[in-house]
Image: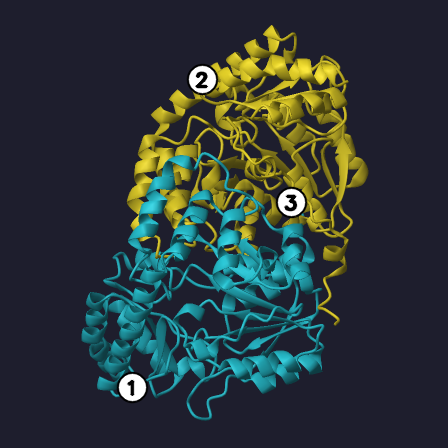
Chain colours: A cyan, B yellow
Amino acid sequence: MTAPRFTSLIDSLPSTVPFVGPETLERRRGRPFAARLGANESGFGPAPSVIAAMQAAAGDVWKYGDPENHELKQALAVHLGISANHVSVGPGVDCLLGLIVRQYVNPGDAVVNSLGGYPTFNYHVSGFGGRLVTVPYRDDKGDFRSDLDALLDAVKRENAPLVYLANPDNPMGTWQEADEIQSFIDALPETTLFILDEAYGETAPASAIPPLDIRPNVLRMRTFSKAYGLAGMRCGYAIGAPEQIAAFDKIRDHFGVSRITQAAALAALADQAYLRQVVAEIAAARQRIGAIAASNGLRAIPSATNFVAIDCRRDGAFAQRVLAELIERDIFVRKPAAPVLDRCIRVSVGPRSELDLFGERLPLALAAADKSA
Amino acid sequence: MTAPRFTSLIDSLPSTVPFVGPETLERRRGRPFAARLGANESGFGPAPSVIAAMQAAAGDVWKYGDPENHELKQALAVHLGISANHVSVGPGVDCLLGLIVRQYVNPGDAVVNSLGGYPTFNYHVSGFGGRLVTVPYRDDKGDFRSDLDALLDAVKRENAPLVYLANPDNPMGTWQEADEIQSFIDALPETTLFILDEAYGETAPASAIPPLDIRPNVLRMRTFSKAYGLAGMRCGYAIGAPEQIAAFDKIRDHFGVSRITQAAALAALADQAYLRQVVAEIAAARQRIGAIAASNGLRAIPSATNFVAIDCRRDGAFAQRVLAELIERDIFVRKPAAPVLDRCIRVSVGPRSELDLFGERLPLALAAADKSA
């Protein structure tokens, strides 16, 4: 029997998954993890006020959510000191990244990212037929930062309509100062759209976040998934110029942000006291992960995010073994796969009990990885 | 200042909204509706067991949902008597429809739908550059059913890779019998993918739902938004052949179904007793809406859905005035816009108190619409 034909682009795509979920690993292993420290979630959870708001909204979910996300956009606008037509809300930054690629990238167009930069963005670039052009991270001082000069060179050389940077960085946790970002923006061609992914903006030093200077060629991405502890609710937003923001309305799923998610995000935004408390806990957890690394002779990369990359100081194969031995010991962590970065593992923050387990089992995993070399 | 260039397709698209939300109308009017009977939601709400499951899951939403929707797919497979590789779960049927268009439609390809058929599907067709080809509903006996023969003719004439049909029908509520659907499938070219949207399958007579005979050129869409009362949670699924199902994994947002939505859908599926009870309440509400129509000299179109189309027996302009007068009287309903269908208004089921209000205010709205002619 013949079958319907996929487009040639769809035909050419692999059935990849940008990130294998911990649940998948648990099913494969046949037992649950003891510590969930791999997905850059916030193990400190959402605010009690947010949980209460969700519980109160649960009976109301027979109604579609407001397709304009009106209340949430208004609240974000007030929170950010901008107007609501500078904000588009979507079901997670991942989804918004897909919409952006679809808006600006024709098949064959170059799209620039760091080598090892956010895989889900790359997934969307491939998904719409873009041509990914990558630039290695700098590691001259072992600081593993995106190379802004090289990104800019690539944009100009390739006449790229789109360039992506996460600041603070994922997967490395490092950050650029605001004036470095601003210089990068100033030097960009006006026809190149810059996606500045600030998913980890709330956990970064203020000096890393440029002022919200709205320009047609910059879209800044924020999320409730990280510091706000709502990864499982799917809510992110883009900040940009009115014309770029309005374009989302041409192709987005208007009812895509669930009603209870709207309620959760509104409540989260209203509880800045909890956010401050969690940001402090995240900073303390980063310190703790750094101390664990140091006590095992490893080097923690300075981080402005809710995770810490740990340089295992040998090659990628060794770091891969460390990862496998941690997973074997019921500790869920991940690691970057790209060259240079791949000698690191990446550990998300979490409550004390989970970091205790990590501290207990890391030396065992290191010894086992060493032995199996 | 120049700006980044949208693709020419994006440039060509209007900033439409397939459906204006009731919240938008409330903001425009400056006051809330007294009865929410326009969006084909289930005013009977989700099961108490589902609300409890959501409340229990609220504290857990700092974790991303399982990107494979494993448990939910397994439960659906058991429920449907098929295997899990016949099911893809997504954040609402709307989103899945977009993915399907993206998978099968090249710019300029014909896509066939009924004239007045589901607008959000058409929105996605335009959004990916497809060429919408429409076929009028039949109304020879005033039954407003999709014209299967004409749809088939259009598919063959246009060599269309994709054809859409909602059974039971939206916006008219009518249905085709399973053998008519099966004959349509048998007659379709094997290279044409048929989207059989069964969003209202749970409220339809069993005779309208063909057996789950898996074929490469049929994708059947189901949802938790209608009878299960979870419109605001975003969960739908596609049933089809393994190759077609696997293709979703090439382009979907893997983390798109929220964690609490997974919990809600699992609980909803487990509570079939509640579903049966609600389906009975929906049937009774349809009867009630029919009686209200009749007592006002109007004709209710027989419905297998959670709404009833009411033929206002004059032209589209009159029905539009009836709609406006109902909205003016705080009753949220909608109406189809396409020729022929447009002499109808469409009223969703709801609890007794809301239908009482509708019954009270419909004669006033009719009189006012008549007067303003």
* Residue B371 appears left or right of A306: right
> Badge 1: few (under 14), some or many (20 or more) residues near its Cα, within 10 Å?
some
Residue at point 74%, 19% (across, down): B372
* Residue A287 appears left or right of B162: left
Q: Are marks 3 and 2 on the same chain?
A: no
> Badge 3: few (under 14), some or many (20 or more) residues near its Cα, within 10 Å?
some
Q: Residue furthest bottom?
A: A140
Residue B301 visible? The answer is no
> Badge 2: few (under 14), some or many (20 or more) residues near its Cα, within 10 Å?
some
Asked which secondary structure carries label 3, the reply is loop
Where residue B51 appears, as percent x and y from the top left, is 34, 36
Q: In which quadrant is the N terminus of chain B drawn?
A: bottom right
Task: Identify whether A71 is placed above or below A209.
Answer: above
* Residue B26 appears left or right of A316: right
Where residue A14 appears, as percent x and y from the top left, is 56, 61
Where residue B373 appears, as percent x and y from the top left, is 77, 18
Which-is-in-front pick, marks 1 and 3?
1
Reading the image, the residue beneath label 1 is: A298
Protein chain holding label 2:
B
The part of the image, by quadrant, that contains residue A353 is: bottom left
Q: Earlier in the sequence, mark 1 or mark 3?
A: 3
Q: Nearer the viewer, residue A48 or A16?
A: A48
Q: Residue furthest right?
A: B157
Asked which secondary structure carries label 2, the reply is helix
Residue A3: which numbered mark, if any? 3
Question: How many numbered marks have been drawn onto this rendered protein structure?
Answer: 3
The kind of residue on which mark 1 rests is: Leu
Residue B352: which numbered mark, if any? 2
The kind of residue on which mark 3 rests is: Ala
Q: Give the alpha-carbon distance from disc 1 to disc 3, as whole Å.
A: 54 Å
The kind of residue on which mark 2 rests is: Arg
